[in-house]
Amino acid sequence: MNFHVMTLFPEMIENAMAESITGRAIKAGHISLNAVNIRDYSENKHNRVDDYPYGGGAGMVMQAGPVYRCYKDIIRKIESETSPKVIYLSPQGKVFNQDMAAEYAKEENLIFLCGHYEGIDERVLEEIVTDYVSIGDYVLTGGELPALVMMDTISRLVPGVLNNDVSAQTESFTDNLLEYPQYTRPEEWNGKKVPPVLLSGNHKKLAEWYREQSVIRTAMRRPDMIAKAELTDEEKLLAKNVMNSVTD
Ligand code: SAM
């Protein structure tokens, strides 16, 4: 997976991605990062890339020209036969989720376009953007944090990035359920004991417990997900009882 990020703040992207799991994945060659400064494509002697909006209104708008030239340069260097997806981070986009991350993880190259100020001239968006993606119904100052959120999530699904690939398959949102609670040593902390089944070594009982806890937790914390999960009749009844007890 090769990430390309069009941004006014490449260091913000590079510094965050250099840490922890993504940093190790870059060093190991499982993912690569190419953060490109849109300002380098300004043709203005002061390196300006924004201007006042036509029609008036608050704030500044990023100009089409520098964004387009930056995009063309990235495309030229990728030399791919197929055009990569270009994701514009925008509060007006489709809200990002785990299924979208799994689809994006199959791509060889992804280009992220980070807006700033009031956004970007619509004409260049029409020209280059394939996907509009939001990370939630709130407005940030720029697209850098959303791009980082997306790249972090997608990276975990790229083979080899996690030491244990199974952990990505059993996490929250897989099968529309949240993950069961986790415990580690000591066996007793603050008077609270680890659930005995976790010490039993009985794999069948463990699997049953994980599944039951996932259903309970999802019903309690994200009842909206339960309708989409594939549950047995017994699990549906359990979820219904949990949801009723929460609203009582
Ligand atoms: N004027 C725009 C509007 O009302 O839709 C908001 C512009 S916002 C201040 C500046 C940039 O931050 C956007 O161009 C976008 O790249 C990014 N951004 C802000 N909120 C976002 C969100 N929830 N998801 C993804 N990107 C976001």
Image (cartoon, rainbow, N blue to C red):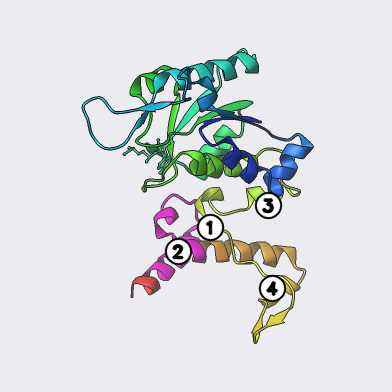
Q: Is residue 203 left or right of residue 224?
A: right
* x and y percentages locating residue 233 in the rendered image: 47, 59
Q: Give me the residue at 37% from left, 46% from top.
A: 139
Inspect the image, locate mark 2, and give the three-letter code of the amino acid beneath it.
Answer: Arg
Tell me whether circle 1 and circle 3 mark residues in contact (CB < 8 Å): no
Are the two marked residues, 1 and 2, in contact with CB atoms closer than 8 angstroms? yes
Give above or below for 117 relative to 174.
above
**Label 4 element class:** helix
- Picture quarter with ligand 1: top left
**Label 2 Cα crowd, 10 Å radius (few <14 / some 14-19 / many 20+):** few
Nearer-N-terminus badge (1/4): 1
Q: Secondary structure at mark 2?
A: helix
- Toward which corner of the image does residue 32 lie, by quadrant? top right
Q: Which mark is residue 197?
A: 4
Comparing marks 2 and 4, which lies closer to the viewer? Answer: 2
**Is residue 118 found left or right of 4 in the rendered image?**
left
Q: Position of residue 90 (x, y in %)?
A: 40, 36
> What residue is rendered at 60% in x and 53% in y?
171
